[in-house]
Image: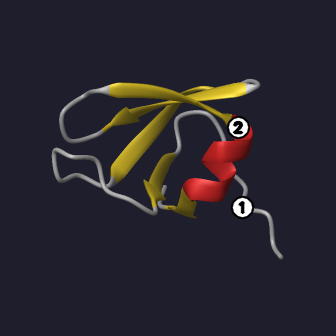
Amino acid sequence: MEEKQFDLNNIVEMKKAHPCGANRWKIIRMGADIRIKCEGCGHSVMIPRREFTRKLKKVLA
């Protein structure tokens, strides 16, 4: 299985949309945990890298 490549400030699409309705997220912090920010409402979420790679659908930009 191909591992998806992502980097800081990339816009990504997750498997599930945010409750606000948007499905575009910006990566704002990388490390053992990854912080992503919703492009719709501005809410940010920090999730473990392993969980992030599992829930990532595709890299948009």
Q: Position of residue 54 (x, y in %)?
A: 65, 56
Structure colour scheme: secondary structure
Q: Which mark is residue 4?
A: 1
Q: Is residue 12 above or below residue 49?
A: below
Outermost residue toward the right?
Answer: 1
Which kind of residue does numbered mark 1 sit on?
A: Lys
Q: Depth-wise, is mark 2 or mark 1 nearer the camera?
A: 2
At mark 1, the secondary structure is loop
Q: Position of residue 9 (x, y in %)?
A: 52, 35
Location of residue 40 (image quadrant): top left
39 or 57, nearer to the observer: 57
Outermost residue toward the bottom?
Answer: 1
Compared across the picture, whether 3 is left or right of 9 comes to right
Location of residue 43 (image quadrant): top left
Q: Is residue 39 above or below residue 43?
A: below
Q: Position of residue 55 (x, y in %)?
A: 56, 56
Compared across the picture, whether 38 is left or right of 4 comes to left
At mark 2, the secondary structure is helix
Compared across the picture, whether 6 is left or right of 13 comes to right
At x 31%, y 56%, the residue is 17
Q: Which mark is residue 49?
A: 2
The residues tagged by marks 2 and 1 sit, at their Cα atoms, a distance apart of 12 Å
Q: Earlier in the sequence, mark 2 or mark 1?
A: 1
At x 61%, y 33%, the residue is 8
Q: Is residue 45 above or below residue 1?
A: above
Q: Which mark is residue 21?
A: none
Which kind of residue does numbered mark 2 sit on?
A: Arg
Q: Is residue 59 above or below residue 45?
A: below
